[in-house]
Image (cartoon, rainbow, N blue to C red):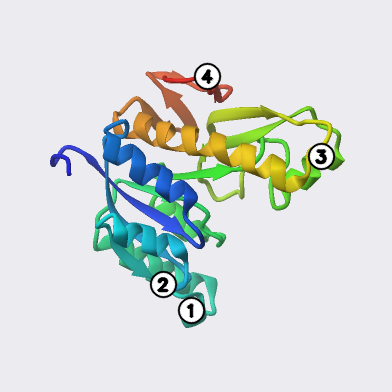
Amino acid sequence: MGNSKQVSAAILISGNGTNLQAFIDAARDGSLDLRIAVVVSNRPDAYGLVRARDAGIATECVRNEDYPERAAFDTALADTLAKYAPGLLILAGFMRILTGRFVRRFEGKILNIHPALLPKFPGLNTHQRVIDAGETLHGSTVHFVTEDLDAGPRILQGRVPVLADDTASRLSARVQAVEHKIYPQAAALFASGRLEFKDGESWLDGARLDEPVQYAGEL
């Protein structure tokens, strides 16, 4: 599954793993030149672990209840990841806030996807908040992770219209379909060396991204 020059990635999950499946599929069909070395969950019952095992990918679990303090959990997580020496960490529905110490250890190598058009609507319950605010556009943003929650430099956005009869669940489903396209694509840009984190900013093809790239197909 690839050669030694491939970037090795660890994907962190907490639940069903639909974004994980998008990565598995993209790696399998050749559109993503990335080796998924391990999938790590903080919940042993996460279905994403089954997806990983079915794809022949190593799995690890660092359970929340074993480490009641955030710092201890993050140390255990970092030590687990170190066994696989990942060049990229992909947060795919990983429902924990990482400590600054952990983020600094992997600075510039952590991607996250947030279901909103950042900087609008950081935090939780974005779909209902977007509807309540009367927004006409919604979507998702891939960004580098920094110590500030949902505030790292943006990379790629995918947009969907907010329809008059939308519920949070219907809107969520359309946003998730966009996520499955843009997240593997952002990882592919990193794996190819086109995307970099420098001086606290996102850089693509040697130019600083003052605004995220808007997804409209292949990049």
**Gap between marks 1 and 3 measured at Cα:** 37 Å
Please, what secondary structure does the residue beneath circle 4 have? loop
Residue 131: assigned label: 3
Three-letter code, disc 4: Ala
- Percent x, y of residue 3: 13, 39
Classify mark 3: residues with Cα within 10 Å, few (<14), some (14-19) or many (20+).
many
Three-letter code, disc 3: Ile
Examine the rendered structure and indicate whether residue 87 appears above or below residue 196. Answer: below
Classify mark 1: residues with Cα within 10 Å, few (<14), some (14-19) or many (20+).
some
Q: Mark 1 points at which residue?
A: 67
Three-letter code, disc 1: Tyr
Please, what secondary structure does the residue beneath circle 2 have? loop
Q: Which residue is drawn at 53% across and 23% down?
A: 215
Classify mark 4: residues with Cα within 10 Å, few (<14), some (14-19) or many (20+).
few
Residue 163: assigned label: none
Examine the rendered structure and indicate whether residue 15 appears above or below residue 190. Answer: below
- Report whether residue 40 is seen: no
**Gap between marks 4 and 3 measured at Cα:** 24 Å
**Gap between marks 3 and 2 measured at Cα:** 36 Å
Q: Residue at x 47, y 55 (%)?
A: 17
- Sequence order check: which comes first, mark 4 or mark 3? 3
Circle nearer the viewer, 2 or 4: 4
Three-letter code, disc 2: Val
Q: Mark 4 points at which residue?
A: 216
> How many marks overall?
4
